[in-house]
Image (spheres, rainbow, N blue to C red):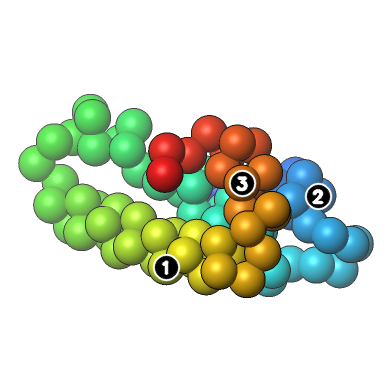
Amino acid sequence: MLTSKKKKTIIKEHGSHNKDTGSTSIQIALLTREIKDLTAHLKKHPKDNHSRRGLLKMVGKRRRLLNYISKIDPKSYSTLIKKLDIKK
C-alpha cells in the first residue's frame, strides 16, 4: 500500500514541476510501485485471486500508458524504462 509520504517522494522524482501530479510518467511510476508491492503480497498469498485480478488490471493500464508515452516522446520513454527498471 502506498502511503502519502511514498507518493510524494515518487512525484518529486518523476514530476516535471512542483504541481505536476498527473503526468504520464508519474502515473507509470506510481503503478510500478503498486505492482511491485502487490507482487510481493501474491508471493506470500498465492490463492488471493481478487488481488491477482487487480494486479493484472494495473499491469494492463501501465502497458497502455507506456505505449502512449513511447508514441508521444520516445526519449522520455527510454529514460523512464531505465529509471524504473521495467522490461520492455
Q: Which of marks 1 and 3 is nearer the N terminus?
A: 1
Q: Identity of the amino acid at label 3?
A: Ser
Q: Identity of the amino acid at label 2?
A: Lys
Identify the residue shown where x is 80% and y is 67%: 20
Q: In which quarter of the image is residue 39?
A: top left
Label 1: element kind = helix
Q: Identity of the amino acid at label 1?
A: Arg
Residue assigned mark 2: 12
What distance separates the C-alpha of mark 1 from that of mark 3? Answer: 15 Å
Where does residue 19 sit, x and y in percent of width and height? 86, 68
Residue 47 appears in the picture as rendered:
yes
Q: Residue furthest right?
A: 18
Q: Earlier in the sequence, mark 1 or mark 2?
A: 2
Label 1: few (<14), some or many (≥20) within 10 Å? few
**Is 71 in front, or is 43?**
71
**What label sits on residue 11 in the rendered view?**
none
Discs 1/3, front:
3
Residue assigned mark 3: 78
Label 3: few (<14), some or many (≥20) within 10 Å? some
What distance separates the C-alpha of mark 1 from that of mark 2? Answer: 23 Å
**Is 87 in front, or is 43?**
87
Identify the residue shown where x is 61% and y is 53%: 77
Label 2: element kind = helix
Instruction: Please give left or right for residue 44 compared with residue 76 in the image.
Output: left
Where does residue 51 sit, x and y in percent of width and height? 24, 53
Discs 2/3, front:
3
**Is 14 in front, or is 46?**
14
What distance separates the C-alpha of mark 2 from that of mark 3? Answer: 19 Å
